[in-house]
Image: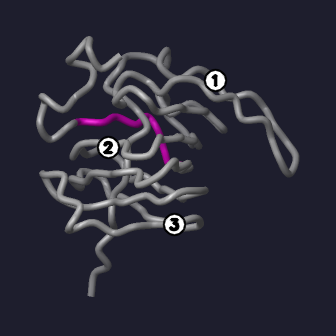
Amino acid sequence: MRTVRLAVVAVAALVSGAAAFGPARHAMGANPAVNWGPAPPFFPAGARFAVMQGNPGAAGVYTVRLEFPAGYKVAPHFHPTDENVTVLSGSFMVGMGDTLDTSHAMTLGPEGFVTAQANMHHFAVARRKTVIQVHGEGPFAITYVNAADDPRGTTASR
């Protein structure tokens, strides 16, 4: 029996180069510094973003963190590569499909983990302030199922 893997949010865009990301700084220790900034423009306004390792806009391993305010939503989308998501804090709903339907979503709390397979259509909602960590092999890209949901297409989203 094949295990269904749920999907979560994306961490990269269809951008040329790595300008949207910036390099991660080397950090060691039990509590490395997290350098938060605004999320790249392929996310709706309101999220914060930190690169922990590598460069998600380039080939190779990357690790990023995203912080979402309560009620934050990422519309149905997909990626060309797998992504691995760990919930560090908060309450995070993830679901499959072409519409954002929370009645068909799973809620993950701290330490919850999910792998989103390449090209799997999925969505996410932060039920309260939530921090997730995403890692995988770059470069990563995000394609919204409905082009009208893509925040890069509207100036009002920024």
Which is more toward the observer, 1 or 40?
Answer: 40
Residue 61 at x, y = what percent? 57, 43
Q: Residues within 10 Å of mark 2 (few under 14, many from 20)?
A: many
Earlier-in-chain disc, 2 versus 1 = 1
Q: Is residue 13 left or right of residue 33?
A: left
* Secondary structure found at label 2: strand
In front: mark 3 or mark 1?
3
Residue farthest along the bottom direction in this orientation: 1
**Residue that mark 3 sits on:** 109
- Chain-order first, disc 3 or disc 1: 1
The count of marks equals 3
User: Residue 68 appears at what percent x and percent y?
Assistant: 47, 41
Numbered disc 3: secondary structure = loop
Figure quadrant of residue 153: top left
In the displayed structure image, the side of residue 10 where residue 51 appears, left or right: right
Judging from the image, the colouring scheme is one colour
Mark 1 burial class by Cα count in 10 Å: few <14, some 14-19, many 20+: some
* Residue 154 numbered tag: none
Evaluate whether residue 62 shows in this view.
no
Mark 1 sits on what residue?
A: 23
Residue 52: quarter of image:
top right
Q: Residues within 10 Å of mark 3 (few under 14, many from 20)?
A: some
Q: Quadrant of residue 35?
A: top right
Seen in the picture, residue 78 relative to 13 is either above or below; the reply is: below
In the rendered view, tell whether residue 7 sits above or below residue 152: below
Residue 130 in the image: x percent, y percent? 52, 50
Q: Is residue 61 left or right of residue 76?
A: right
In the image, what residue type sits under mark 3? Answer: Gly
Front-most of 81 and 91?
Answer: 91
Magenta residue span: 135-143
Outermost residue, top direction? 155
User: Residue 73 got which mark?
Assistant: 2
